[in-house]
């Protein structure tokens, strides 16, 4: 999922591995301060693309309480999701590359190796849990999550081989429950905009659509 943003950002100056702790006004411009105390100066407008809980913390720590409060509903709507990527040396004999199984455990099962441009040895399958199941198991050990997922995957596909590698990921800010889908949020008074998949129906295309709409509105907004 990071391939798109890596390709899009090739021609811009990008500081990765930096956590912004605070936004502050330096005259008419925004200044950003990271968790090491480093400053980034001179911005007319700011786009925040963090998930809502992290965006809310950032706004609160920047003294922007009304903007932070405006995210309360979005924060409450975000559901966590346990995910496991599992590798099988022998291709799984299953007639679908992606399914939403009728299962208490799994919500989504996809053959990642079937995506264009993949030249994997064997197959990588990506398994996502149901939100309710994730809630019940949110603090379980990754090993027991993988065990439950792989047993369910075996029952679904009939593939008896054990996975020869697997990678668990507890995705705390996964999908946005039904609710308001405004696309983006923009406060013309401060010049601060928020974009992300959680504002536009989830998934990577939601992130794209949200950001595309926001930058259009910000470009048309008079400078602060
Ligand atoms: C295991 C897994 C599998 C997935 N599979 C698919 C798939 O097959 N298809 C699909 O469409 N989508 C998939 N997704 C979902 C997809 O990755 C997301 O929809 C997409 O990444 C959302 O993009 P975003 O820019 O809104 O947010 P994110 O990608 O979550 O980016 C937010 C970024 O903000 C950063 N951040 C937070 N706080 C701060 C701060 N204070 N300072 C600086 N940075 C900060 C975070 O570190 C993060 O990098 C998957 C996700 C996971 C976890």
Image (cartoon, rainbow, N blue to C red):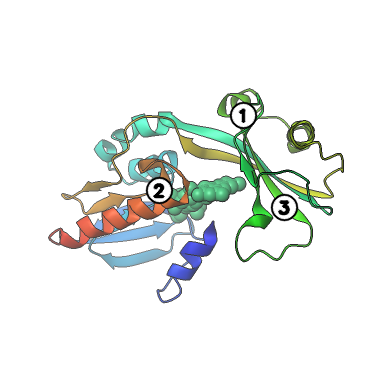
- In the displayed structure, would residue 76 be above or below residue 205? above
Mark 2, secondary structure of its residue:
helix
Q: Residues within 10 Å of mark 2 (few under 14, many from 20)?
A: some
Return the residue found at the far left: 222
Helix, strand or loop status at disc 1 = helix
Query: Mark 3 = which residue?
Result: 124
Frontmost residue, 209 versus 110 = 110
Q: Is residue 27 visible?
A: no
The residue at label 2 has a CB less than 8 Å from ligand 1 = yes
Query: Is 125 situated left or right of 26 in this image?
Result: right
Figure check: 181 above or below 213: above
Look at mark 2 in the image and give the residue it sits on: 206
- Number of marks drawn: 3
At 41% from the left and 33% from the top, the residue drawn is: 75
Determine the CA span between mark 3 and mark 1: 22 Å
Residue position for label 1: 134
Res 53 quadrant in image = top left
Label 2 or label 3, whichever comes before in sequence order? 3
Q: Are marks 2 and 3 in contact (CB under 8 Å)?
A: no
Please, is residue 39 above or below residue 70 in the view?
below
Q: Which callout, 3 or 1, points to the residue nearer the camera?
A: 3
Residue drawn at 70 percent across, 66 percent down: 119
Percent from the top left, x then y, of residue 220? 16, 60
Q: Position of residue 166 (x, y in %)?
A: 76, 47
Q: Are marks 3 and 1 in contact (CB under 8 Å)?
A: no
Quarter residue 223 falls in: bottom left
Seen in the image, is 6 located left or right of residue 166?
left
Observer-nearest residue: 169 or 181?
A: 181
Outermost residue, bottom side: 11
Mark 1–mark 2 distance (CA, rounded to whole Å) = 22 Å
Instruction: Specify which label sits upstream in the sequence, 1 or 2.
Output: 1
**How many C-alpha atoms fall within 10 Å of the one at disc 3: few (<14), some, or many (≥20)?**
many
């Amino acid at each position: 999922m990071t391939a798109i943003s890596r390709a899009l950002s090739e021609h811009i100056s990008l500081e990765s591995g930096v956590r912004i702790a605070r936004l502050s006004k330096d005259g008419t411009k925004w200044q950003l301060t990271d968790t090491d105390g480093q400053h980034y100066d001179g911005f007319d407008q700011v786009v925040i693309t963090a998930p809502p809980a992290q965006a809310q913390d950032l706004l609160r720590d920047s003294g922007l309480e009304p903007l932070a409060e405006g995210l309360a509903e979005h924060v409450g709507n975000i559901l966590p999701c346990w995910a496991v990527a599992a590798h099988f040396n022998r291709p799984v004999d299953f007639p679908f590359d992606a399914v939403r199984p009728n299962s208490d455990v799994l919500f989504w099962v996809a053959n990642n190796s079937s995506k264009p441009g993949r030249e994997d040895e064997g197959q990588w399958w990506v398994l996502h849990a149901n939100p309710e199941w994730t809630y019940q198991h949110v603090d379980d050990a990754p090993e027991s999550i993988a065990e439950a997922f792989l047993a369910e995957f075996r029952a679904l596909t009939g593939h008896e081989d054990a996975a020869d590698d697997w990678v668990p990921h507890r995705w705390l800010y996964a999908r946005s429950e039904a609710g308001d889908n405004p696309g983006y949020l923009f406060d013309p008074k401060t010049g601060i905009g928020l974009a992300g998949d959680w504002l536009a129906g989830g998934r990577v295309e939601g992130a794209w659509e949200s950001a595309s709409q926001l930058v259009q509105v910000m470009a048309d907004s008079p400078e602060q």
